[in-house]
Image (tube, rainbow, N blue to C red):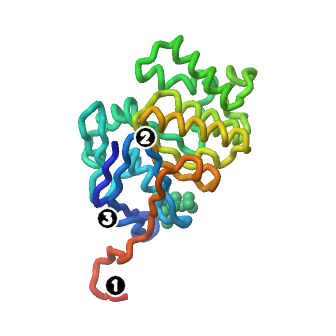
Amino acid sequence: MVHVKGLSKGFTLHTQGGAAIDVFDDISLEVWAGECICLHGSSGAGKSTLLRSLYANYKPDAGHIVVQHGGEPIDLVSAEPWEVVEVRRRTIGYVSQFLRVIPRVSTLDIVTEPAIASGVPSETAYASARILLSRLRIPDRLWSLAPATFSGGEQQRVNIARGFMVDYPVLLLDEPTASLDAANRQSVIELINEAKARGAAVVGIFHDEEVREAVANRLFEVGRPAVRKCRCNSATEAAA
Ligand SMILES: Nc1ncnc2c1ncn2[C@@H]1O[C@H](COP(=O)(O)OP(=O)(O)OP(=O)(O)O)[C@@H](O)[C@H]1O
């Protein structure tokens, strides 16, 4: 479903004297339908940067991210913005750590929105949203409220419900259980395993060992490049 080839990414901090940070270099990875890859590595190794690159939030410096989209391969590194929008609507779902709260929009509407955008009839979408919110133990008295005032764990569960509303062929999960208690962690484990069973290719960051063991088929080590590229301009700076 996802084929990453020779992917490299660094950042240049233009507001801080052009300092260059090489994050990863020449990464290659394949993710098949029905499996879950856990991105692994020390803090700052580049796990979130890789995940965001897979969602085309960051543009890699080199390499390819080829995704099967509607039966055709598409390279997200060279895709046009409208193609990225289409891929996100139909093929790749992303659950970030934090919910982007929209003022005055109810929990039910936030959760339902991706399904309606992907063409699911509104009645079906609302019925699925209610089931997901119940499975994730969001009390129904909160469904009509905007989640701005919800606890961290409640907001995270609303975000997870939103991410699982559409049966995306590819799912990217950035620490989906970071603020959850044991019962809710278990619900998320079940949702991930159900997604795998229907053939989703899942890539995630799971710091929680119990979650990792319950869902991951493989660990993929994200590490700093063995040889750091120097982006200095002069030979003197390069030598230094
Ligand atoms: N938008 C950005 N601009 C500049 N540098 C960034 C940006 N995002 C990440 N970095 C840098 O890239 C490196 C990798 O960060 P990243 O968040 O991908 O690591 P991580 O492995 O997910 O870490 P953690 O486990 O602590 O969340 C860090 O050195 C970080 O400072």
- Amino acid type indicated by mark 1: Glu
Q: Is residue 156 left or right of residue 198?
A: right
Using a 10 Å C-alpha cutoff, classify the residue at mark 3 as few (fewer than 14 neighbours), some (14 to 19) or many (20 or more). Answer: few
- Amino acid type indicated by mark 2: Gly
As measured in the structure, the alpha-carbon distance from the residue carrying label 3 to the one carrying label 2 is 25 Å
Position of residue 121 relative to residue 160, above or below, is above
* 3 or 1: tag closer to the N-terminus: 3
On the image, the x and y values in percent for residue 187 come to 65, 36
Of labels 3 and 1, the one closer to you? 3
- Amino acid type indicated by mark 3: Asp
On the image, the x and y values in percent for residue 78 come to 25, 47
Q: Quadrant of residue 222?
A: bottom left
As measured in the structure, the alpha-carbon distance from the residue carrying label 1 to the one carrying label 2 is 48 Å
Position of residue 152 relative to residue 123, above or below, is below
Using a 10 Å C-alpha cutoff, classify the residue at mark 1 as few (fewer than 14 neighbours), some (14 to 19) or many (20 or more). Answer: few
Position of residue 203 relative to residue 198, above or below, is below
Residue ID for mark 1:
237
Using a 10 Å C-alpha cutoff, classify the residue at mark 2 as few (fewer than 14 neighbours), some (14 to 19) or many (20 or more). Answer: some
